[in-house]
Image (cartoon, rainbow, N blue to C red):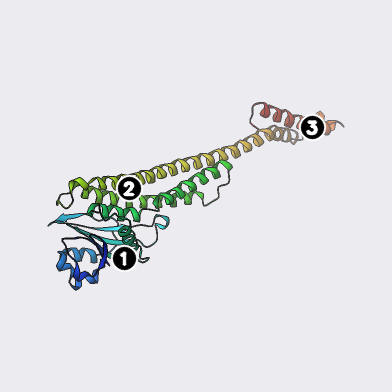
Amino acid sequence: MLYEFSDALRQIETDRLDETRLSAGVVTLDALKAGLAARVGFGAALIEECEKTDARFRSAVEIGDGRLFAVVSVRDIANVYGARDRIGLFVKKNLLLLVSLRDDDRSIPAALEETARLVNLKTVSLERLICVFFERLLSRDGSDLESFDNRIASMEAQIENDSTGKSFNGEILSLRRRLLVIHSYYEQLLDLFDAMLENEADLFQPKNLYHFRTARDKIARLSANTQLLRDSLVQVREAYMAALDYNANRIMKVFTVVTTVFLPLTLIVGWYGMNFKFMPELASRFGYPAVILLSVLVVVLSLIFFKRKRLL
């Protein structure tokens, strides 16, 4: 799928590509090998780079011979552990070529089609096309990050209400890992836009570089928000650990009070359990009630003491 931008937006075949006119399109690796690669100067080294394993998350930007190339991983941040799309970004004068390396949901052609419909044909430029395309890919990221923010606020409320479960700490760690992947995704895009802003291969018009700066600022804000969410999770975990410590201390305080209350009773039981022959209380008819009264009095006085000291 190729678009040509002139007096009107036209969809053209690969064999009718005119490099003197601004064009953009999504092609497969097979289409490149079938002859398009040689026509646009997409060398064998770049094809080999596209064929490499997709285990790497971040790829370096290659600039030279009047072109820019990078393999870009595209994430759906609402499902960061799902399969990620991968595209080969190939840029020359008047040409934006997206090589579809992995696109299970067909989101890359949809984003380019939407980009083609959004740009103003009277003012369209290569720089504007690139920026609008990436803006389409990132269009839902702000709301998705907001859902992370809402989840963190909900976790804070759980801590405040003492309604956390056994899996709470694992959920915190899982969210942090997801946000780390998202942060790395944005860092990859920042690297790409930094390279385009440097314009080493003189591919872009200096007067149009402000498009890259605007797009880069948006990505930088998303990256900063992601890092802020990660920092918030650190604070949530600290609050959770503090709540656990508080609950443990409260339980230990109860145990301490109970032990302290019953310690005098233990002494009384041990004292009168010696059964010496000449202990007068053993022969007295009031000995047993007196020990009961003494024990109750010790318990009551101990509870009053702890209550006044705000230990109960």
Amino acid at pointer 3 = Val
Element on which disc 1 rests: strand
Q: Which labelled disc corresponds to residue 291?
A: 3
- Name the side, left or right, on which 15 lies relative to 139: left
Q: In the image, which is nearer the foreground, mark 2 or mark 3?
A: 2
Q: What residue is pinned by disc 2? A: 219
Whole-percent x, y for residue 185 in the image: 33, 52
- Name the side, left or right, on which 293 lies relative to 192: right
- Name the side, left or right, on which 172 lies relative to 246: left
Q: Earlier in the sequence, mark 3 or mark 1?
A: 1
Q: Are marks 3 and 1 in contact (CB under 8 Å)?
A: no
Amino acid at pointer 1 = Arg
Q: Is residue 26 visible?
A: no
Q: Which labelled disc corresponds to residue 102?
A: 1
Neighbour class for label 1 at 10 Å: few (<14), some, many (≥20)?
some
Q: Are marks 1 and 2 in contact (CB under 8 Å)?
A: no
